[in-house]
Amino acid sequence: MTEAQHAQTAHFDLDPQHSFMMWNPAGALLSDAGKPFIIPIAGLIAGAVMMQVPKVATTGKLVLYFGAQSFMNIYMGWVMRTSVTVPKGTELPNGKLLEVDLTGCPAGFALTAMQQVISFVVFCIFFA
């Protein structure tokens, strides 16, 4: 392959350095742990600002609720993902011992129910 052909094929390869994502300011400013909080923070800020304008106050409450609900979703996902389900050292039915903690809880419906109940209580406390 000649140098010109190599340059042309390299130009069209699927390399993340050849995309607009290379200049992603959120990627440069935030760690992977902080990136999920961008949308909830934006929702909370936008909702708080909108609630100050009487014409869009009701919509602002919904945007604020969306931001709070997004935070709740991230938090509950973290709780369910990091909780130790079976500790290391537990003897399995086959006689082997677990070498690492088993974490996580498959709780789709429980997660949704807890989010809705907690967010409803918080919403009632702050807006009742």
Image (tube, helix red, strand yellow):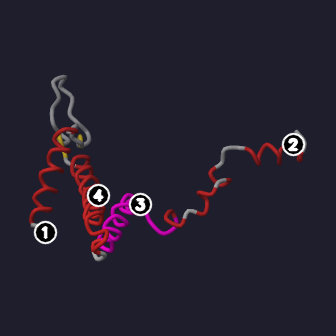
Compare marks 1 and 4 and give the one earlier in the sequence: 4
Secondary structure under tag 2 reads helix
Q: Nearer the viewer, residue 48 or 27?
A: 48
Residue at x-position 53% and y-position 67%: 25
The quarter of the image holding the N terminus is top right
Q: Which numbered disc, 2 or 1, marks the residue closer to the eye? A: 1
Q: Which numbered disc, 4 or 2, marks the residue closer to the eye? A: 4
Tell me the residue that label 1 is attached to. Answer: 126
Q: Nearer the viewer, residue 56 or 81?
A: 56
Compare marks 4 and 2 and give the one earlier in the sequence: 2
Asked if disc 4 and disc 3 are in contact, CB closer than 8 Å, the reply is no
Q: CA distance from mark 1 to mark 3?
A: 27 Å
Q: Amino acid at mark 3?
A: Lys
What secondary structure is the magenta-colored segment mainly? helix
The quarter of the image holding the C terminus is bottom left
Q: CA distance from mark 4 to mark 3?
A: 17 Å
Q: Amino acid at mark 1?
A: Phe
Residue at x-position 12% and y-position 51%: 117
Q: CA distance from mark 3 to mark 2?
A: 39 Å
Task: Point out the stretch of residues depicted in magenta.
Answer: 28-50
The reply to whether the magenta stretch includes residue 97 is no
Secondary structure under tag 1 reads helix
Tell me the residue that label 3 is attached to. Answer: 35
Q: Is residue 43 left or right of residue 112?
A: right
Q: Amino acid at mark 2?
A: Gln
Compare marks 4 and 3 and give the one earlier in the sequence: 3
Q: CA distance from mark 4 to mark 2?
A: 51 Å
Q: Residue 66 has which mark?
A: 4
Compare marks 3 and 2 and give the one earlier in the sequence: 2
Question: Measured from the top left, where is residue 22 in percent x and y?
Answer: 61, 59
Tell me the residue that label 2 is attached to. Answer: 5
